[in-house]
Image (tube, rainbow, N blue to C red):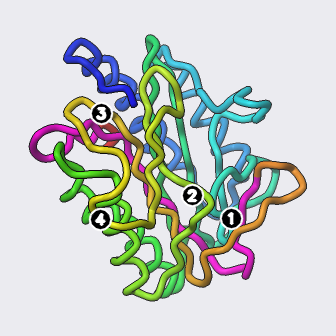
Amino acid sequence: MICKTQADYDGMRAAGKVVKAALDAAEKCVRAGATTLEIDAVVEQTIRSMGATPSSKGFHGYPNASCISVNDVVVHGIPSLNVVKDGDIVSVDITALLNGYQSDAARTFLVGNVSERDRALVAAAKEAFELAMEYAVAGNRVGDISATVQMFCEFGGYGVVRDLTGHGIGHNMHEPPEVPNFGKRKTGAPLKVGLCIAVEPMITAGGWRVKTDRDGWTVRTSDGSRAAHYENTIIVTDGAPEILTV
């Protein structure tokens, strides 16, 4: 577990601004009729225009600058010529590297006439993150974040994905500790001042089980239910966490 120094903070903040800008650009492009590959191109152009590199491109052979996951795909959807349709929900997950510092965030966007059930699902993922931030304070433990997400989402009738977790982040895309979306309070790694973590509720309208497509990347719900993903990179402090990607 690597805690950042004051000297690291500016680098993490700058990387966070890149990811936020890329998400904002993606949101403008997510519309019925656009292909996910077109959205990915906008993400990559935005990242590179700010002097940064899309971290996912080439990561263990991943081919694109972002992960774009539609409807029942939870994460790691590969951009393609598939067209976004009215009523879809589209998750865009972006990681960027700037001057040796990584940042990571995701949003699920609504396309056109989305059902009330899907709107509630997407809103719940965001609210779970916001509630978890009340516990992302030095002196607590990762399990306090995890349990908050699980309790809120399961009380609302949503599935909480077990196979995928949040993570530490800094000079590397993935650093210790893992940050699950389920667990028990007062367990897990201690939250210390300067710890940078990506907290990312991944929830479904059905069960929590997932499966991976033959491409080795695309993770979708086993029961075909829709999924939502909301993620930000944060710095743990002795007070309210600093959220770098909003």
Amino acid type of disc 3? Answer: Leu
- The disc at residue 185 is 4
Secondary structure under badge 1? strand
C-alpha distance separating marks 4 and 1: 29 Å
On the image, numbered disc 1 is attached to which residue?
Answer: 73
Residue drawn 75% across the image and 60% down it: 83
State left or right for residue 13 relative to residue 124: left
Q: Residue furthest front?
A: 187
C-alpha distance separating marks 1 and 3: 30 Å
Stretch of the chain drawn in magenta: 218-243
State left or right for residue 128 relative to residue 56: left
State left or right for residue 27 relative to residue 79: left
First in sequence, mark 4 or 1: give its number: 1
- The disc at residue 91 is 2
Which one is in front, 63 or 158?
158
Above-or-below relation of 187 to 93: below
Residue 214 seen from this side: yes
Which one is in front, 70 or 148?
148
